[in-house]
Image (spheres, rainbow, N blue to C red):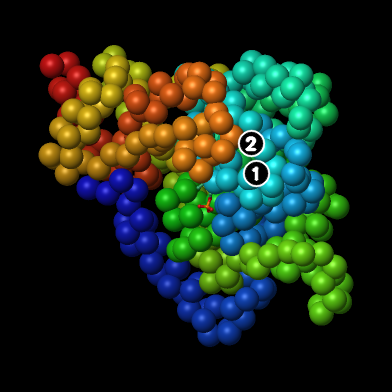
Amino acid sequence: MQFRDLKAQYTALKDEMDKAILEVVASSAYVMGPKIKEMETAFADYVGVKHCVACNSGTDALLLALKAWDVTAGDAVFVPSFTFFASAEVIAMQGATPVFVDVDKDTFNMDVADLEHKIEQTKKAGKLTPRVIIAVDLFGLPADFMAVRKVAEKHGLYVLEDGAQGFGGRIGEQKACTFGDISTTSFFPAKPVGCYGDGGAVFTNNDKWAELMDSYHIHGKGSDRYDNIRIGMNSRMDSIQAAILLVKLKAFKEYELADVNKVAARYTEKLKDVVKTPIVPEGFYSSWAQYTIQVGNKEIRTGLQAALKALDIPTAIYYPIPMHRQTAFNYLNPNENQCPVSDKLADTVLSLPIHPYLSEKEQDMICETVCSFLRK
Ligand SMILES: *Cc1c(COP(=O)(O)O)cnc(C)c1O
């Protein structure tokens, strides 16, 4: 069994996909060809923002946003401790200081009370200037952006939505990747919409920031191609990936997002009496980058993972080490007790296989194995 069956997806899309890829190959417009504009327009229209700039990864997308805001040494950026490393890494890459915020035990997303607390603490210490809140749509569920926005407005901070896992999610009718002043996503193959390699994008309604990020992602270009007006990077998306994403977006809109939600609903129905299943708050809609259960402790998790593995059912631990315990962040001298929920989740979470092509038979086998192990 596959954790995320990309081969089944390719098989389903093969005719259209092969045609789209070969078209780019035949066109020889491999870099910044017309497919890029087409992809950017389609993705901006889908989420409902004015600008999308395609780039080389979700990590670069975050970096481009921080560059547009000139986030630099002496700035504090607030980020959840329970996330993928890149959310925090980019802050340090800009020379700024990450301040780790704990998460909510039910949604896995930023705990807004702790956010407020960490901002107050940072202000009181007086060493750093609070600038940005990076709120992550973890596992496909949008963060609580109404609450995050309120805190941001109170303290005059920008909101950066890390929607690397969140593409396709919604709060009410508003789609993920529109909640930040700038929002980002990743098209890494295993994300809700993935390409066949690395890719990412930034989204914003702000003309000035869109122009800056467009410039930064191509060597700080100005209007004259050979007069570069700022120090940038090489973070273009390949035309071939844009063509792949256009085919994938169509399938995602037509059935994949609905189908992955059916799998999640069925999992929850079958598992909710034996284990803590993921909670989607009223009015929220997830794109299920992961389906993550919580068990009583680390020993139970190790046993359950082994029982599943014995039946060829793959699982994953997202994430075993919170940001405040990452070796790379030792230099921040992190306080042991700064993010207790993140610490607990690191020991108790387990992600089950989930994707739109997971058969009911496979779902049943997974659920029966989890139930029989936990009822023992
Ligand atoms: C995957 C991921 C990223 C980074 O995206 P890449 O395309 O792999 O660079 C950033 N943040 C989160 C939360 C992610 O899951």
Labels 2 and 1: the sequence-earlier one? 1
Name the residue nearer the viewer: 124 or 290. 124
Taking the spot 16% from the left edge, 23% from the top edge, the residue there is 373
Describe the element under mark 2 as helix, strand or loop: strand
Residue at image mark 1: 91
Q: Residue at x 64, y 50 (%)?
A: 93
- As helix, strand or loop, the secondary structure at mark 1 comes to helix
**If the image is split into quadrants, where does the C terminus sit?**
top left
Residue for badge 2 = 98
**Residue 159, position as x, y percentages in the image:** 72, 35
Q: CB under 8 Å between callouts 2 and 1? A: yes
Query: What residue sits 76% from the left and 32% below the top?
Result: 128
Compared across the picture, whether 302 is left or right of 202 comes to left
Q: Is residue 14 left or right of residue 33?
A: left
Pointer 2: residues within 10 angstroms few (<14), some, or many (20+)?
many
Q: Label 1 crowding class (10 Å Cα cut-off): few <14, some 14-19, many 20+?
A: many
Identify which amino acid the numbered label 2 is placed on: Pro
Say what amino acid the circle numbered 1 marks.
Ile
The percent position of residue 355, horizontal first and vertical second, equals: 37, 44
Residue nearest the observer in this picture, 149 or 369:
149
